[in-house]
Amino acid sequence: MGVDVGTTNIAVLVVDIHSGIVKAVSVIHNDSEVTGEEDRLKGRSEWDAEKAAEIVFQAMAKAAAKVEPQKVRGIGVTGQMHGTVLVSDDGQPLTPFIGWQDKRCRDNIPGTNKSYIARMIELAGENGFRREGCRPATGYMGSTLFWLKENDALPSRPATACFLPDYVVMRLTGCDPVTDPTNAGSSGIFDVISKRWDYNLIRRLGLQGVQFPEVRGSGEVIGELTSEASRKTGLPRGVSVSVACGDNQASFLGSVADRRISVLVNIGTGGQVSMWVPRYIEVKNAETRCYFDGGYLLVGADICGGSSYALLHRFFLDVGRAFFGSKGDENLYEKMTAYAAKVPPGSDGLRCEPFFGGTRLDPDRKAAWVGLNESNFTAGHFSRALLEGIARHFKILYEHMLQGGASHRKCLVGSGNGMRKNALLAEIFSDMFNMPIRVPLNPEEAAFGAALLAAVGYGKFDFEEAACLVSYG
């Protein structure tokens, strides 16, 4: 069984590891967000971790009811790898889960013109983040903990910083919080080369009062389903549960059949371009993340993706309300894409930079349409130019990886709802990358990857054999 704890939906599937056939799927909307309206306007993103865990139990129960529960041998968990929730020694959440979309660390420290991120970089020193695989960013565990410390908001009692999937595993097993390098490496305070918490950096940031979970091997079985979890999920007590892993890495395992020749592009709310390398390398504007097999994923991640197309969708709805008496709740995506498909590649000279929320590295960057003229000032051109802008941005990130020492790939794998539900976007990416594109048959790639990782941890096969179970439409 694979569990994907997302902030939009929580997905669970059961896969037959002999055939790779998915036997059951359950998806439930994650409505555990507790951000107040005032805080939302400040860019905050806070969630009730315990309510999210209860939704996980419900989704697991729905999936288990579709199969013979006693045949489930192992459970793998993945989910949102950025963000943190602080828990007490007895496993109680002491803070909300503060997620990846939280923007509080962009704010300036009171009385200064310096952001919390800038202050972290200053305290760390010139090479302070060289071994972390990433620069600090708002929404990352290390950055959020730094903000809480600077604002005297850390719990007064002993607390362990957890990732949300690790919190779920703790609730499933009753074990103390543990993590793996794929999750820990997303924190910005973890040495991805030695695969240990970077306590020198942690001390420089003043975070030595926070406890961090033990780091275990990816896929390692760390406990069994408790009687309470068994009752809530309908699964037998004692089913093996593996340490949770990062959703980016789980999606890669669940999408890519041949990691040596493939580059993965995932387009959901945001987007990521990922490729596997056997050793650690540094790449401009990309992160180097731990992978399951001792290798690494080079990852170019950004917030432009489905959210940018959704913003254009909202603009068209607003025009309809303001000028044509529309209700404003229509679904125009198919029409937008149909009009975009009638526009030739290149959008007749119209180019879009779809950075309405900035970028990860430059949060103040603005969006733009460039090259407007009398012939391309149409809804179809705007729609196509935006889709091309998304693809162009991730192609540039891929080129940075090649310049950093990664080898050219032959095949593009497209995952996420942005690719799966928009054939034109998939076609644009294929043209932009000049590669054939393949889309995995299974739409819940992260949950599928988590299930495969659990099977590897259980000793059923190795990573090469697991990847052979990935199939494409």
Image: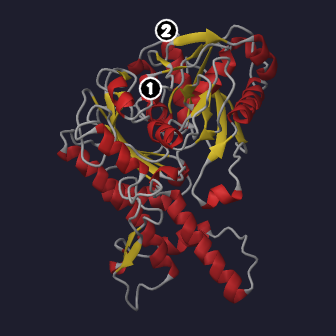
Disc 1: which residue: 208
Q: Residue at x 66, y 31 (%)?
A: 94
Placement of 293 over or under 302, stated as above or below: above
Q: Is residue 258 visible?
A: no
Picture coordinates of residue 347, whole percent (x, y): 38, 76
Nearest the viewer among 180 and 255 is 180
Of all residues shown, which one is farthest toward the front? 111
Q: Secondary structure at mark 1?
A: loop
Q: Any mark on residue 237, and which? A: none
Q: Residues within 10 Å of mark 1 (few under 14, many from 20)?
A: few
Q: Is residue 227 visible?
A: yes
Q: Residue at x 77, y 11 (%)?
A: 227
Nearest the viewer among 228 and 445 is 228
Instruction: Please indicate whether residue 284 sits to the left or right of residue 89 in the image.
Output: left
Placement of 80 over or under 321, stated as above or below: above
Picture coordinates of residue 285, whole percent (x, y): 29, 49
Placement of 344 over or under 147, stated as above or below: below
Distance from the alpha carbon under mark 2 to that under mark 1? 37 Å
Placement of 468 over or under 405, stated as above or below: above
Disc 2: which residue: 459
Nearest the viewer among 37 and 408 is 37
Picture coordinates of residue 125, whole percent (x, y): 26, 39
Lower sequence index among marks 2 and 1: 1
